[in-house]
Amino acid sequence: MKTEITYAVEEQVATITLSRPERLNALTSTLLTELAESIEEANQDDTIRVIVLTGAGRGFCAGQDLKTVQPGMDHGDYLKQYYHPVIRALATTKKPTIAAINGVAAGAGLSLTLACDFRIVRDDAKLSLGFINIGLVPDAGAPYFLPRLIGSAKALELALLGETITAQQAYDYHLVTKSVDAGQYEQEVASFAKLLASRPTKVIGYIKQLQSASSESTLEDMLAQEIIYQSRAGKTEDHQQAVQAFLEKKAPVFSGR
Ligand code: LHQ
């Protein structure tokens, strides 16, 4: 029984909602543990084709719950125990992930979104790396993901200045996939998730694994990897029926297998 998140499945899309709205879904050890379990559950469930991460109420996530930080607590130990399993689960899941940023995302709340494949932000949401404002370094995967997403100069600027940026700025910096008008936001997230759920899910997993290998690899490594994954992709039902559909001048229908 989960108490600080909700997990709901509809039409092959698992939606994980951070659920402490009275504190803008600030993160606790309980929430982080439940979150890691839920991502793993969705990852293992063959009927799930997309994972959406969002927040209850007016915020996405205000980062670590600062009211639960005990004097003398070692932040490094805390990261290792509670945050890193979540970041690893998000970064390695075979399923496509969407961070649906329904409101403010600050500190480690923003970091969670960086470990997802897509970020769809409501146009009135504010984003802040913010760690520097309380004398901390960015964490929860942000030092890895942010420079790779937006380049090292902009990443350093956001980390050192800790400023709050608008959804439009986030889009201009290529930090988010799209910024959507508040009135259409929920519908847009649902239709984007539905679109991803209709794609060849197994092959999406292969593409993600290839891309994640590329940042640490040489050309020769990657040529070797593409042989492995294209061989697997070529044996999927989705590939075989899509070629058949092409030959018959029909639209492919992907089962995800
Ligand atoms: C909160 C929080 C919050 C508790 C809003 N905690 N209550 C850190 C330490 C250890 C190990 C691992 O790593 C980390 C990583 C981190 O994430 S450090 C960064 C932590 N987060 C922040 O520094 C952000 C703090 N929050 C804010 O700056 C503002 O609340 C933002 C800009 C997010 C939203 O501002 P507003 O829209 O004006 O809302 P608010 O400030 O009025 O907040 C609403 C309520 O939520 C309020 O409670 P109250 O009882 O007064 O109504 C806040 O106290 C509570 N809240 N963030 N992180």
Image: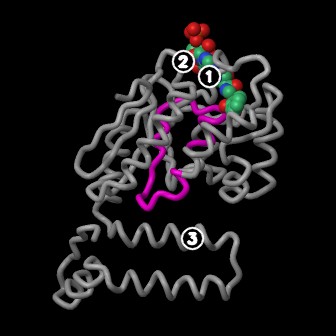
- Tag 2 near tag 1, CB within 8 Å: yes
Residue at x-position 21% and y-position 76%: 251
91 in magenta = yes
Name the front one of labels 2 and 1. Answer: 1
Residue at x-position 37% and y-position 33%: 183
Q: Is mark 2 within 8 Å of ligand 1?
A: yes
- Tag 3 near tag 2, CB within 8 Å: no
The quadrant of the rendering that contains the N terminus is: top left
142 in magenta = no
Residue at the limit of the structure toward the bottom, as seen here = 247
- Tag 1 near tag 3, CB within 8 Å: no
Instruction: Check disc 3 and report the residue beneath it.
Output: 211
Residue stretch in magenta: 89-112
Residue 144 found in image quarter: bottom right
Q: Amino acid at mark 3?
A: Gln
Residue 168 place in picture, x, y as percent: 59, 42
Q: Amino acid at mark 1?
A: Asp
Residue at x-position 67% and y-position 41%: 80
Location of ligand 1 given as a quarter of the image: top right
Mark 3 or mark 2: which comes first in sequence? 2
Along the viewing direction, whichever of 168 and 89 lies nearer the viewer: 89
| Secondary structure beneath label 3 | helix
Residue 152 place in picture, x, y as percent: 78, 56
Along the viewing direction, whichever of 19 and 129 lies nearer the viewer: 19
Along the viewing direction, whichever of 44 and 253 lies nearer the viewer: 44
Residue 45 versus residue 9 in the image, above or below: below
Mark 2 or mark 1: which comes first in sequence? 2
Q: Is mark 1 within 8 Å of ligand 1?
A: yes
Instruction: Check disc 1 and report the residue beneath it.
Output: 65
Q: Amino acid at mark 2?
A: Arg
Residue 175 place in picture, x, y as percent: 62, 50
Instruction: Check disc 2 and report the residue beneath it.
Output: 23
